[in-house]
Image (tube, rainbow, N blue to C red):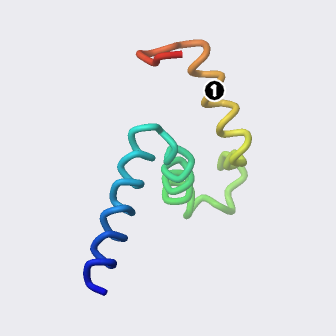
Amino acid sequence: MNLLATVRTGARNVAWFVKGVMGEDAWDKYKAHHESLHATDAAACDSPRMMTEREFWRDQTDRQDINPQGRCC
């Protein structure tokens, strides 16, 4: 049973690493940053609205198309 737990933990760590390298965790980072930065300003009128996940990825793709930096495709 201990071996199985070790394998699962290793697999989770590898998945976490691959997601970070591929940029798949960008939405989670954006969401955490936005929530921490604007948590106290939530009631303020000038506080920017958090993008939806779809808007975030569209913006991310548009920025990469305008300014390609070291990617294969």
Quadrant including the C terminus: top right
**Residue 9 sits in which quadrant?**
bottom left
Residue 60, position in %: x, y? Answer: 60, 30
Looking at this view, name the residue that lies furthest to the bottom: 1
Residue visible at 48% across and 50% down in the picture: 29
Res 3 seen here: yes
Residue 65, position in %: x, y? Answer: 61, 15
Judged from the image, the secondary structure of the residue bearing numbered disc 1 is: helix
Quadrant including the N terminus: bottom left
Residue visible at 53% across and 53% down in the picture: 28
Q: Which residue is mark 1?
A: 61
Residue visible at 53% across and 47% down in the picture: 30
**Toward the viewer: 54 or 42?**
54
Residue 52, position in %: x, y? Answer: 72, 48
| Vertical comparison of 49 with 8: above or below | above
Type of amino acid at the residue the image marks with label 1: Thr
| Vertical comparison of 21 with 59: above or below | below
Res 46 seen here: no
Callout count: 1
Tell whether 53 sits left or right of 9.
right
Tell whether 64 sits left or right of 58.
left
**Toward the viewer: 44 or 35?**
35
Within 10 Å of disc 1 (Cα), the crowding (few <14, some 14-19, many 20+) is few
**Toward the viewer: 61 or 49?**
61
Residue visible at 67% across and 56% down in the picture: 44
